Amino acid sequence: MNRRMIGLALGALAVLSPSAVLAVQDGLKIYISADMEGVTGAVTSDQLGPAGFEYGRFRQFMTDEVLAAIAAARAAGATEILVSDSHGNGENLLIEQLPADVRVVRSWPRPLMMMQGIDETFDGAVFIGYHSSTTNPEGVRAHTMSSATLTAVRLNGIEMSEGGINAAIAGHFGVPVLFVSGDDAAVEEVSGLLGGIGEGVVKWSYGFHSAMTLTPQAGVDVIRAGVEEAVRTSGDARPYVLEPPIEVEVSFKHYQPAELLSYLSIVDRADAHTVRFVAADMLEASRFLAFIGRYRPDLSP
């Protein structure tokens, strides 16, 4: 039984004092998955990739938000933290600024994508800098996995954001999502799917490339307060579990990816732009999505 489950059991006993309930949460193990489109102030490619003139500054802002989440989790009893750098090339965080005892997942490919390294030993997951899905008409830089190539990702018929996919991967291991930060559309979408999680809205979308935003320090303050509260009350959280088998549907902007993938005997072509794959569980579903997102015939070495 992990510490989160112990907390659930003890929290149900009225004879326990609040301090006793908090005591069993000491030593929590927290997973932090960090994206960049949902970071305070980020609105265009100028902030989101090495070619953008503001990218260097926004690497710092992203790092500051992760540092705030780490500090907040520790204040709430976490003693072990794994951070996944999950945007773009996976090499965005200024890792020399992170605490020495924090581990970091970097670069690609990874079979569990933005959740690589999570397992059943974790007590909760925190999503920092997330954005809304490709099927959401609202949200800054709204997309799922690829804004250039995909128009929809569905798991068991449910339209998914990256937050939903990642929550289902965590749920496979019995790990609940505790908190999400990003723009208002992203936070509403993830919270609406999962229910009852901590929310950190750091900007309000006006469109794909515009928003009203907090300042970076104000965004850090929102994240620090929200993560600490979410981790302190993590005993009440429930994992998001999709019952296997997992039907994965992916819709492409163009015909040819769907056509070629349908050459594989394990893949069905649902329509001109959509393929369907039935996975045994979320781990297999994640590997299929990772393959779609990363495979190219000219990969090297």
Image (cartoon, rainbow, N blue to C red):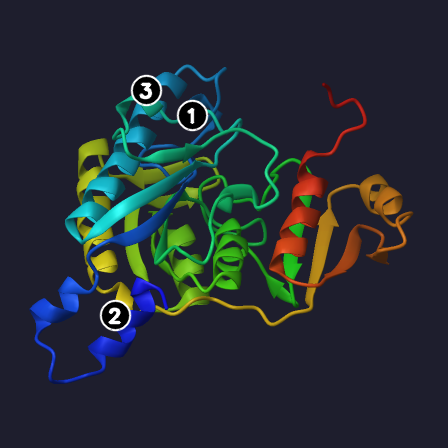
How many other residues sit within 10 Å of disc 3, few (<14), some (14-19) or many (≥20)? few
Residue designated by label 1: 92
Q: In the depicted view, which residue is nearer to us: 32 or 16?
A: 16
Which residue is depicted at the point 29% across and 59% down? 198
Total labels: the figure holds 3
Q: Amino acid at mark 3?
A: Arg
Q: Which mark is residue 7?
A: 2
Marks 1 and 2, how far apart at CA: 35 Å
Point out the frontmost of discs 3 and 2: 2
Q: Outermost residue toward the front?
A: 1
Q: Amino acid at mark 1?
A: Asn
How many other residues sit within 10 Å of disc 1, few (<14), some (14-19) or many (≥20)? many
Which residue is depicted at the point 30% across and 37% down? 66
The answer, for residue 54, to whether it is visible in the render is no
How many other residues sit within 10 Å of disc 2, few (<14), some (14-19) or many (≥20)? many
The answer, for residue 40, to whether it is visible in the render is yes
